[in-house]
Amino acid sequence: MNKIPVIIDCDPGVDDSYAIALAKSHPNYEIVAITPVEGNVPAVFTRHNALCLRETFEMEHTKIAYGATEPLVRPYFRDASGTHGEGGIGGIKLPDPTRAPEEKPAWDVIYEEAVKYNGELVLFAVGPLTNIATALRKYPDLPKYIKRFVIMGGGTFGNVTATSETAEFNIWVDPTAAKEVFEKLEVYMVGLNATHAAAVEVKDFDEMLEITASGKNKQSDYLNKLTKFSKENSFERGQDNNVIHDALAIAADMNEDVVKFEKFYVYVEDREVENVGETVIDLKGESGKAPNCWVAMKVDQPLFVKMMKDMCKYYAEM
Ligand code: BDR
Ligand code: CA
């Protein structure tokens, strides 16, 4: 059976790391590229982390193509290291990478791979949408080459409480990019309402810790440290790392039973108003506009948690 080509556009990131690990554990995916963007931490860190993760998870055939360092219009002024730890991956130090990134930028690699796979590519975006918007500006025919576009972002409520209670972080960092992307691509939006409904409990983290501790390889070692950080940072320090947001976007495509989507008209508020960065969802169909976005509305939490544990087992038993 031919594998499904996938690209993960991301800002690693603790939950981005789980997303990459989950995708790599799936027997039917071929991760053709990872394209880091600014986000949880500045691009200098997300780039470094992407290179390190390629080697930790032994993704020899995966291209790393650097993306944007700042949002399209807004200044980049957020440091989410409270949630993601120093350097973006829980303060964990991975060995310095031995391989360099592609010479071409993220948007060129996304387009070239999409054309190469002739409409079979599944594109995940689990960070701010700057790279995807840039690709769409440069290559307006990109949508016809994308089989499915799944994001972690937006949702029916927000988490950027300092400035807006309705905006989700990824969309809020670059609302200009998000607005353009939602207008040009059919989005499968795995938002906060879905990811919070899939939150991981202490007992499940404990099981993941046990499984990863039994694995004697660098993948299990990294997942063990990541899980320790996630557990402590959630239940002891009040952050939301028990919500493994980005992995749910991957899980949603891996197994259609995990997330149920419904189609609604959605637009992104990109003006500098109180709710900048909100994904405004016409849940009642009152706008008269045609539905354009698949919104994750229901989640099978036990199934998602099982997938996370199975992923840990996959690496532990390698
Ligand atoms: C999203 O923001 C980031 O902090 C996470 O990696 C996730 O992609 C959740 O709002
Ligand atoms: Ca992310």
Image (spheres, rainbow, N blue to C red):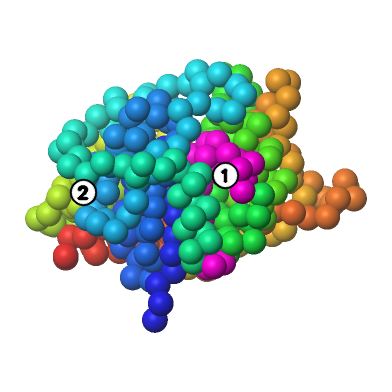
Residue 130 x %, y %: 55, 36
Residue 168 vs 223, above or below: the answer is: above
Q: Residue furthest left?
A: 216
Image quadrant occupied by the C terminus: bottom left
Q: Nearer the viewer, residue 174 or 146?
A: 146
- Judge whether 252 appears above or below 140 on screen: below
Q: Find disc 1 in the rendering and name its residue.
A: 135
Q: Is residue 274 above or below residue 141?
A: above
Q: Which residue shows up at 40% across the image and 72% down it?
A: 3
In the rendered structure, which disc, 1 or 2, sits on the residue that comes first in sequence? 2
Q: Can you tell which mark lies on residue 56?
A: 2
Amino acid under disc 1: Ala
Q: Is mark 2 within 8 Å of ligand 2?
A: no
Q: Give SS at disc 2.
A: helix
Please give the count of numbered marks on the rendered protein.
2
Q: Position of residue 28 (x, y in %)?
A: 38, 71
The kind of residue on which mark 2 rests is Thr
**Image point (62%, 35%), residue name:** 177
Residue 134 is inside the magenta segment? yes
**Label 1: how many residues lie within 10 Å, few (<14), some (14-19) or many (20+)?**
many
**Quadrant of the rendered image containing residue 313:** bottom left
Is 154 left, or right, of 110 in this rendering?
right
Q: Is residue 30 visible?
A: yes
Q: Is residue 98 left or right of residue 22?
A: left
- Quarter of the figure with the N terminus: bottom left
Q: Which residue is outermost to the front? A: 103
Disc 1 versus disc 2: nearer the observer: 1
Q: Residue furthest bottom?
A: 1
Q: Which residues are magenta?
A: 118-139
Which sits in the foreground, 80 or 8? 8
Instruction: Give the residue drawn at x 79%, y 46%.
Output: 282
